Image (cartoon, rainbow, N blue to C red):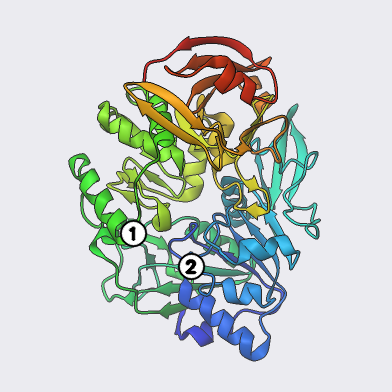
Amino acid sequence: MYQIMSVEEAVGLIRDGDCICVNSFVGIENPVALHEGIYERFKKTHSPSHLTMVSSAGFGVWDENRNAEGYIREGAVDKLICGHFGAMLSTKKIILEDRFEAYNLPLGCISHAIRAQAGGLPGALSKVGLDIFVDPRREGPGINNISKDTSLISIVEVEGEEFLYYKLPKITIALIKGTAADHRGNISFDDMYMSGDALSIAQATRANGGKVIVQVDKLVSTPSRPRNAIIPGCLVDAIVVCEPEVRHEAYEALTGSFEITYKEWNEWIEKVDAIAQTQRKTPVVSNIIGKRAARELKEDDIVNIGIGIPETISRYARKNGMLDRITLTVESGGIGGFPASGAVFGAMIGAASVYDMSNQFDLYDNGGLDICFMGALEVDRFGNVNSHRGPGAYAGIGGFANITARTPTVVFCLTFNTRGLEVTRSKGAVTIEHEGSIPKFVPEVRSVSFSASRALANHQRVLYVTERCVFSLTSEGLKLIEVYPGIDVERDILSQLPFPVICEPKQTEL
């Protein structure tokens, strides 16, 4: 039977050595009060300590002094297993200092492994991750020098097919943020951006004899409608009521609490950007890339658009009339709206449906998307892509590996080089005014996020769209297939590449 508790009482249920699973998505829907309660307890008592933390998509709030950052930095955590670390500002830095073990697994594979544990299974099979960095025959999932746990991923064969087997430590504490608890302890998520892995985390924790702790905004006397009670009260141990932070109307729009039609999307995007102080002064190179990439969209496509340069694709999809003829999706579970970005990445404007995150990755892993548009840090001579690891920096793979593993058409959107690249466009012609000092096309990528050989075996169509040309993936490597007006093939492309490519370009109008 659940109990209403204070923050202090609830975090008192956590023992040294527990494995805590957090339901959140990058920077949204974190149970902030519970995390900060853990930190206050740890500062006073040095407990709980030796914790293992698991989260499909990470659990930061873009502030190195809030949420879990304090107790991780002070040494309460021995092991961290996440799909993405982008919003965990201090944590992603000290990971590289070997302060504790840290592992990066594909976001969807963690989500599925949590669901497997909820069903009494030790782990989950997946083809996602084969031939990329997490594959034990390559680097494995460990991020730093002390991360040597070989139990998280293993190679298995089932009926003659090769899979990766993802296995998480047994979850003993669930930390979840919900909207409301009714008098039966049922937890609803009505005013949330998503429900994520909440139900699976609660089921897995209870199956392991652990404690489910839920932070909610309020208690309600009226029982939740059965389909709205994401977590039934019988699975909940502690409910902590915390006054929610005041949300601007623009953020309220992302909860789905009122309908936003396609015609209103742009208005609400502008409102969200204004409150987030997001500057959408898109560089010329991003506009060139976005305009060309958007031509790959077809009516009725189911689509995922990554962050960064790929976000410009939606602008040109609107201009060419395709945006309301396709279905956009986001990893957190949203379908049929417009993905938000920045601090509220994972939320959606005008979503038609928001379901559990593991179900979204069922769609992605099984090739349910028609096309995806992803960014890239590096591309090598084979067509392999690194999207997750820069020099001295680590954000994590997130949902990238799941999204690109089986999608029939994969479009990578990247500049030819960076740091100092200057490009102008006039009357449809592109001029490279100054080359950047850091190349993005390299002989060998630093770490493999996307395997070209695996894509070829899966018969995927892969394009690499830049600000000056387009390459396609072939069994013989990259093939130059399009060059933009104003670009000189030898001077602006071939001389800038550290490896040969098949050269059969046609000129493409912008």
Nearer to us of marks 1 and 2 is 1
Q: Which residue is mark 2?
A: 176
Q: How many marks?
A: 2
Looking at the image, which residue is at 34% across and 79% down?
243
Three-letter residue code for mark 1: Gln
Three-letter residue code for mark 2: Ile
Give coordinates of residue 144: x percent, y percent.
75, 57
Q: Residues within 10 Å of mark 1 (few under 14, many from 20)?
A: few
In-image side of 125 versus 331 (left or right): right
Badge 1 element = loop
In-image side of 434 versus 268 (left or right): right
Looking at the image, which residue is at 48% across and 24% down?
468
Badge 2 element = strand
Give coordinates of residue 382: x percent, y percent.
69, 24
Q: Residues within 10 Å of mark 2 (few under 14, many from 20)?
A: many
Looking at the image, which residue is at 58% across and 84% down?
12
Cβ atoms at labels 1 and 2 below 8 Å apart: no
Q: Which residue is mark 1?
A: 277
Tell me how far mark 1 sits from mark 2, CA to CA: 28 Å
Q: Is residue 1 above or below residue 400?
A: below
Figure quadrant of the C terminus: top left
Choose between 173 and 75: the one closer to the eye: 75
Q: Is residue 141 above or below residue 371?
A: below
Choose between 503 and 77: the one closer to the eye: 503
Q: Is residue 212 visible?
A: yes
